[in-house]
Image (cartoon, helix red, strand yellow):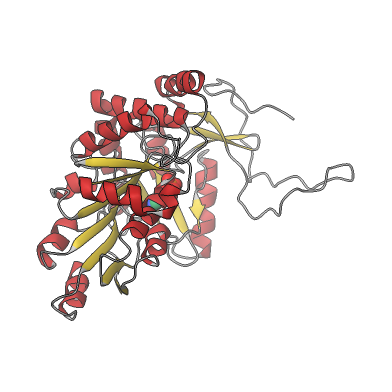
Amino acid sequence: MPQPPRIRSPRRTAPTSPLPRPALPGPSSPPPRCVPLLPPPLRVASRTEVWLGRRRLTYFGGCDYFRFSVHPQVLAAAIRAAQQFGLGVAASRRTTGNHPLYEQFEGELADFCGAEAARLVSTGYAANLVVAQALAHDFTHLLIDAGAHPSLHDAATFFAAQRLQFRAGDTAEAVRLQAKLPAQARCLVLTDGIGATDGAAAPLAALRAGLRPETWLLVDDCHGLGTVGRTGRGSLELAGIDHRQVLHTGTLSKALGAFGGVILGDRNLIQRVTTSSPLFTGSTPPPLPLVAAAKAALARLRTHPGPLRRLHAHVAQVKQTLWAAGRLERITPGPICRVVPRDDLDRKQLTERLLKADIFPSFLDYPGLPSGGAFRFGLSSEHTRAQLRALIQAVTGD
Ligand SMILES: Cc1ncc(COP(=O)(O)O)c(C=O)c1O
């Protein structure tokens, strides 16, 4: 099998168009091992480029907002941890799978986010489920943002509570719904901190101000942690609220470029998720080298403010230009641009322009996107000015 090219390979393959089709199996090919339901595989070519077959394209897909997944110091931390500790603990942390690295990193994450405590779990998706399992009987009513990530909708099913849905980001509707609930209702609002498909910030301060004071918030901050707020502490920092009555979840797989999930909150919450979730009790924590990688990424984020500043500048520049050209519905703070094609022809022309500019056309059909899908461009601190200009030109057609 041909080996994927190394990261930072200077080799460039001459652009070809259109997108290469997957090779059809010939008479001597082995039978396919799986039904091809997934898009074609991509391989890293450099921090901001991917190989799609033999074509090298600028990449605005994914959520590796600082490209820590290929950062030399982050990779070195992962390799050191693998050599020192092995790949994983092969046991639940409630049995024999606890490890000092987990506890160290939990302390650092809690400190960074301004929470009393943190608990690592296997993934960001699992973080929401673990919280829901642990607090299944604490609430009588859930108010869920209709645009929330599937993991929050899934988590909602674990609560023994009545579920009501409000329009994405619509505080007024959430407040109206709550006003109709009995005075003794114990309410939890579930929302993404930063929308996965459009970078929109949840109106956390307005929710806090408008909802009854005893209401709790479950904020999935998978896209906000590390990327928004003056110091990257996430959507709570952006909204200017603290962790009081907030169940805060996140991932190590986006801004930190690694893998794993995290729950942040007060000590009581962390004690409850540790002792009362079958998912936490019955599953293996994230692999140690990936925790070490996330730890190194977080340390860099804290000591090197340059990439966060660059990310914020890239977000402002690209979004203002695309919005002024009528290609964005609104300017949002997260590092994600959602460009909805006007029709099939527009989609085709956008795809062609992106490919002509050697940009991977990241058109997705994913929960939370308008039916029929949309282009989703993830911006990173590491994209060059030329790459950002090329993206803007390809999208606007200028
Ligand atoms: C808003 C949101 N929540 C949760 C997740 C799941 O995180 P993970 O990939 O770490 O399971 C994602 C990932 O795509 C996400 O976008």
Quarter of the view holding residue 11: top right
Place of residue 83 in the rendered image (x, y in percent of width and height, measured from the top left): 51, 18
Quarter of the view holding residue 16: top right
Place of residue 171 in the rendered image (x, y in percent of width and height, measured from the top left): 19, 67
Residue in the foreground of this view, choosing between 170 and 111: 111
| Horizontal arrangement in the rendering, residue 56 relative to residue 61 (left or right) | right
Quadrant, the N terminus = top right
Residue in the foreground of this view, choosing between 60 and 258: 258
- Residue 231 against residue 363 in the figure, above or below: above
Residue in the foreground of this view, choosing between 22 and 322: 22
- Residue 281 against residue 132 in the figure, above or below: above
In the rendered image, the residue lying farthest to the right is 27
Place of residue 33 in the rendered image (x, y in percent of width and height, measured from the top left): 75, 48
- Residue 205 against residue 185 in the figure, above or below: above
| Horizontal arrangement in the rendering, residue 79 relative to residue 24 (left or right) | left
Question: Residue at the spot x=45%, y=53% of the render?
Answer: 375
Q: Is residue 390 among what the camera can see?
A: yes
Place of residue 147 in the rendered image (x, y in percent of width and height, measured from the top left): 35, 64
| Horizontal arrangement in the rendering, residue 390 relative to residue 264 (left or right) | right
